[in-house]
Amino acid sequence: MTSPRKISIYIPEDLVPVLEEVENASAYIADSIRMRRRQEATRAALRDAGYLVSEAGVQRMRERVRALDVQNAEAIAAGEE
Amino acid sequence: MSTVRVVLDASALLAYARLRGMATAELVTMVEEDGGASLVGIPAACFLTAYEQLEPDEQERLVRLATTSEGVTVILPLTGTDTVEVAALGSVMGHAVVETRRWRAIMATYDGATARKHLPQRRVLELDDA
């Protein structure tokens, strides 16, 4: 991680309250940028590979994974792991 | 701190690299969309097993998936005595089984029947592109 650098930026008025409510606005913005870069890098890799992923397909996958997450949480709570 | 939420075995990597793995692509996208620090784990031994079976263009696709800077995937190293357990479990999913247990993750595979011999059913996500 590089040393932080102070810059001035403009943000839309409606987003100001968001930054006023968080404990560390700089960290919040930095995390948001990292998440955006992660999204762009991942989607570019899939797109360049030839995959056109649909939102419906992702949602179906999310529901399947969450169902397993629930079962795993229950097993851990029950001391099975 | 980052955590591995899903682990891909060699069958999932092979299908992805051969453009027959839409379910794998959807799973990677899901982890990315869910944000946080969750990652998709690619066990090193599974990567090697898949890589040697692929044509050059397919290898390139696999490498891009596994090494995209700032992406959602991470190659999981195989070290120490884990190597012995992985050898016993087999090269296709052995390392994926070990990493799934370590991270309390979910293993994604196109061979659910074999995976369920080594892991509880709730730790196995059987992929299906039908």
Image: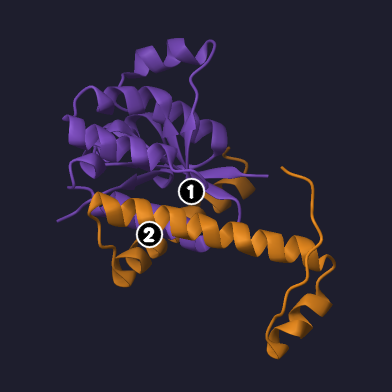
Chain colours: A orange, B purple
Q: Residues within 10 Å of mark 2 (few under 14, many from 20)?
A: few
Residue A64: give its label.
Answer: 2
**Dot 1: element:** loop
Amino acid of disc 2: Arg
Please tell me whether residue A66 is drawn above or below residue B72 in the rendered image: below
| Chain containing the residue with disc 2 | A
Residue B43, image quadrant: top left
Could you tell me which residue is drawn at 18 percent across and 41 percent down? B18
Residue A46: percent from left, percent from top: 32, 53
Could you tell me which residue is drawn at 27 percent across and 32 percent down? B114
Which mark lies nearer to you, 2 or 1?
A: 1
Q: Residues within 10 Å of mark 1 (few under 14, many from 20)?
A: many
Residue B72: give its label.
Answer: 1
The quarter of the rendered structure image containing the C terminus of chain B is: bottom left
Amino acid of disc 1: Val
The quarter of the rendered structure image containing the N terminus of chain B is: top right
In the rendered image, is residue B26 in sight? yes
Q: Is residue A52 left or right of residue B130?
A: right
Residue B11: percent from left, percent from top: 25, 35
